[in-house]
């Protein structure tokens, strides 16, 4: 299985998952033009797409879909709550799934789980292919028992490490936005991300990708060091960027 992070952050999100000639896209928050540019940055191309899965309806996760009807012929999967918020979206093949339901699609098993975030019905994903398990949770304000349970046993996790609380509180954001980010349904801090990773490393985790970093309230170096100092040396750690594609991981 090959994992390509094409975009991660408030400016857009897209994660491509490939297994042989099959591929899934988690979120489509960038333009088709940028999507192709980011693929080329990783020396990749995409001839076909089997499905798109949406984590929730916020614009940085669905922006690219607005102008793609008729250009990409792949079903889009989302929860009922997410589709309720996206009723305006014109798409030929809208598919619905329920949290906990396992969707089997061309060699992929995809299972969504509810996450705490200020959207209608936001989810993370556990994806299995080729005997490997990948977890994705890139927008969540806190880690509850369900999130922990669903991510136990994944070998690779893409997890939000959005902000450093001190940088956020001393930064220029208005107070209500700071409270939203810090809230239980906001965005995950470096410290909370690191804490969850330290738990998951005891359940088979060997690779972690820090995602959805704020450019105003975080730095890649700070996010990396916060998790790195708590993880065992054998855990490979990667950091995403809003400005370029990567990482590209095979496992």
Image: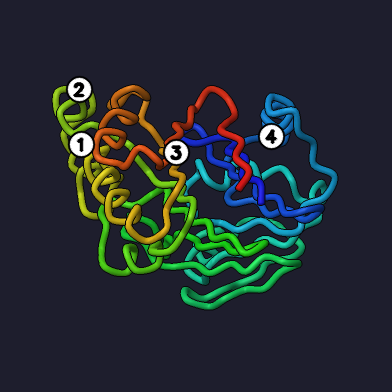
Which residue is at a point 68% across and 66% down the rendered structure image? 94
C-alpha gap between disc 2 and disc 1 = 9 Å
Does the CB distance between marks 1 and 4 fall below 8 Å? no
Q: Of the residues under marks 2 and 1, which one precedes in the sequence?
A: 2
Q: Residue furthest front?
A: 234
Q: Earlier in the sequence, mark 2 or mark 4?
A: 4
Q: Position of residue 179 (x, y in %)?
A: 18, 42
Along the line of sight, the residue nearer the viewer: 159 or 26: 159
- Residue at the spot of label 4: 35
Q: Real-space Cα distance between discs 3 and 4?
A: 26 Å
The reply to whether the C-beta atoms of the residues labelled 3 and 1 are less than 8 Å apart is no
SS at mark 4?
Answer: helix
Image location of residue 237, percent across then percent down: 42, 36
Mark 2 / mark 3, whichever is N-terminal: 2
Quarter of the rendering containing residue 142:
bottom left
SS for callout 3: strand
Label 2: few (<14), some (14–19) or many (≥20) C-alpha neighbours in 10 Å: few
Question: Residue tagged by mark 1?
Answer: 178
- From the top left corner, tell me how far across and down residue 88 is, in percent: 61, 57
Q: Which mark is residue 171?
A: 2
Mark linked to residue 236: 3
Numbered disc in front, either 2 or 3: 3
On screen, residue 125 above or below 222? below
Inter-mark Cα distance, 3 to 1: 31 Å
- Say whether residue 20 is visible: yes
Q: Disc 3 vs disc 4: which is toward the camera? A: 3
């Amino acid at each position: 299985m090959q994992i390509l992070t094409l975009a991660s952050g408030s400016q857009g999100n897209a994660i491509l998952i490939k297994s042989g000639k099959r591929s899934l896209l988690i979120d489509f928050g960038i333009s088709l033009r940028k999507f192709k540019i980011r693929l080329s940055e990783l020396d990749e191309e995409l001839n076909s797409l089997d499905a798109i899965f949406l984590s929730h309806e916020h614009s940085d996760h669905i922006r690219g879909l607005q102008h793609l009807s008729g250009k990409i012929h792949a079903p889009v999967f989302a929860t009922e709550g997410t589709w309720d918020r996206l009723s305006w979206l014109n798409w030929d093949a809208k598919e619905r799934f329920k949290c906990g339901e396992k969707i089997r699609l061309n060699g992929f098993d995809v299972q969504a789980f509810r996450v705490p975030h200020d959207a209608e019905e936001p989810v993370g994903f556990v994806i299995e292919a080729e005997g490997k398990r990948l977890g994705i949770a890139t927008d969540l304000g806190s880690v509850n028992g369900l999130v922990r349970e669903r991510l136990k046993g994944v070998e690779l996790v893409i997890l939000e490490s959005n902000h450093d609380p001190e940088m956020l509180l001393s930064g220029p954001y208005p107070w209500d936005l700071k409270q939203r980010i810090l809230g239980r349904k906001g965005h995950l801090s470096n410290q909370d991300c690191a804490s969850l990773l330290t738990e998951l490393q005891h359940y088979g985790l060997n690779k972690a990708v820090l995602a959805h970093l704020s450019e105003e309230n975080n730095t890649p170096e700070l996010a990396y060091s916060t998790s790195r100092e708590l993880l065992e040396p054998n855990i490979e750690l990667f950091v995403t960027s809003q400005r370029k594609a990567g990482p590209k991981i095979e496992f």
